[in-house]
Amino acid sequence: MIIILKQGVSTREIADVVARVEELGFRAHLSQGEERTIIGVIGDERRIDPAVFEVMPSVDHCVPILRPFKLASRDMRPENTVVRLNGVRIGAEEVVIMAGPCAVESRSQLLETAFAVKEAGARVLRGGAFKPRTSPYSFQGLGEEGLALLAEAREATGLPIVTEVMAPHDVPLVAEHADILQIGARQMQNFSLLHAAGESGRPILLKRGIMSTMEELLMSAEYILTHGNFRVMLCERGIRTFETYTRNTLDINAVPMLKELTHLPVIVDPSHGTGQWRLVPAVARAAIAAGADGLLIEVHPRPDQALSDGGQSLKPETFHRLVLEARRVAEAVGRKL
Ligand code: PEP
Ligand code: MN
């Protein structure tokens, strides 16, 4: 349930309502918007009696949140959450492009890609150090060495870093190096990892599971939010369907649907969503037109030599063209890029 306070209530009155919520054995989540202050009451919805709060002079009215996700719900926070890092604002007017190699392979590969994507207009550098691979015989990533290279690339370019963390025990290490922790599609329901990500206090890029519904994605986000970490971005990266011509089926519906259901920024990954570099620019443009707050794109200077996902990686010059075209779409739908 959410408690909507009257306009112009004092800090003292807000604290009184929060205290009452906690006294009754619930947790209170305070959200102070420009227009109004709302307090989310977190706990067993059936046990919450709105009348208890509606008698308080500072309370305007109460609204039940019927959806299973509460903190992630737009009812709880009507305005968009904006994730801020190093001057980049994700979830605001600008469509933010995160780009880089699927995996960090070497110092030269990473730095070459990092400078190229920055030059083309990327605002965040991606690159995996811990890689979730289907086969144990495939390249698994450089691990800690990869993290150090990412940190070096950040120093050199000024771009914040997003990189995947696969295991709860790696969260402190990855959080030490990265600006955004990526939780991959295969880990979306690793609940221990979600708790650890919540505790890290770092912004989180949470990717939709290969076979997960939007509601399951939002419930996973809810795990992170319950730790008070609200810097969560959702990522549509394609789901598995009966279609075989593309690696995954990018669910474009998820963009406007999630924007309606949640205040969290929505990022689209057309690289994994299609699995083919030729399709990436068109799907990237579609994502922006549908309302995406950002894109996650794989770029490699020599895709034919890539140790992972070469077939869906763009060469820097193709990426550059993508950004120019995407900018025109962004402007057409009232965004900046
Ligand atoms: C990736 O971003 O390289 C990746 C492994 O993504 P996903 O978890 O969506 O497959
Ligand atoms: Mn990849």
Image (cartoon, rainbow, N blue to C red):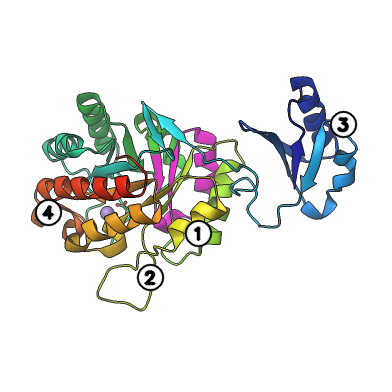
Foreground label between 3 and 4? 3
Residue 23, numbered circle? none
Ligand 1 picture quarter: bottom left
Q: Residue at x 24, y 60 (%)?
A: 282
Residue 189 image position (x, y, % from top left): 51, 56
Instruction: Report the amino acid beneath label 3.
Output: Pro
Does dot 4 land on a helix, a strand or a loop? Answer: helix
Residue 62 image position (x, y, % from top left): 79, 45
Does dot 2 land on a helix, a strand or a loop? Answer: loop
Residue 240, numbered circle? 2
Q: Residue at x 55, y 43 (%)?
A: 224
Instruction: Name the residue carrying label 3.
Output: 57
Q: Quadrant of residue 136?
A: bottom left
Q: Residue at x 36, y 79 (%)?
A: 242
Instruction: Report the amino acid beneath label 4.
Output: Pro
- Magenta region, residue range: 181-207
Q: Name the N-terminal-most of marks 1 and 4.
A: 1
- Real-space Cα distance between discs 2 and 1? 18 Å
Marks 1 and 4 in Cβ contact (< 8 Å): no
- Real-space Cα distance between discs 3 and 4? 64 Å
Q: Quadrant of residue 199?
A: top right
